[in-house]
Image: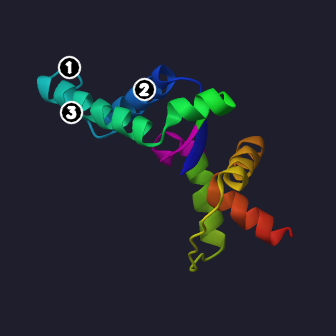
Amino acid sequence: MRVISFKSYEEYREFMIQKFIHKAKRKGAKLENEEFQKRLDERMERVKEFWDERECEKQIADRGSATLSVHRGMFKEDQRKVSKHLDNTRLTESIHVRLDANTYDKLLTFCEQHDMDISQAVRFLIQNS
């Protein structure tokens, strides 16, 4: 996952359209057919639901942007960086942590400042504490 901030729903929607098209091209989909358009429309409905469920408009009003996690599919340079790291170290343990909103905002800010995803940031902070 990668953490990205969006200043509007339109910016997020455009990002998700480009991500969907990128993935479809990789899979060899024909972008001009009706089936593709139908799937894109369905996906955009889910994108809007996701945006609303996460109360992103409220985040924008409060902080000036909505910060969301997106899968790395479009970020090949990040995939290589993570894969290289995983090849050298076996990561076998998993954790789940609940945070209050203020702490989570600090973590997301740290991630953005250091161009890390949440998992990388947590590993970094633990190893350097």
Q: Which residue is mark 2?
A: 13
Tag 1: amino acid: Glu
For the image, the number of numbered tags is 3
Residue 40: x %, y % from top left: 26, 29
Instruction: Write down the residue under mark 1.
Output: 32
Picture layout, residue 33 above or below residue 20: above
Which residue is located at x 75 percent, y 49 percent?
Answer: 106
Q: Position of residue 29 (x, y in %)?
A: 23, 33
Mark positioned earlier in the residue sequence (3 or 2): 2
User: Depth-wise, is mark 3 or mark 2 nearer the camera?
Assistant: 2
Residue 83 highlighted magenta (yes or no): no
**Which disc, if any, is residue 39?**
3
Q: Quadrant of residue 129?
A: bottom right
Q: Name which quarter of the figure residue 39 lies in.
A: top left
Q: Does residue 80 appear left or right of residue 121 in this picture?
A: left
Is 73 colored magenta in this rendering? yes
Q: CA distance from mark 3 to mark 2?
A: 15 Å
Instruction: Give how far across and how far down residue 79 sits, in percent.
Output: 55, 51
Q: Position of residue 128 (x, y in %)?
A: 85, 67
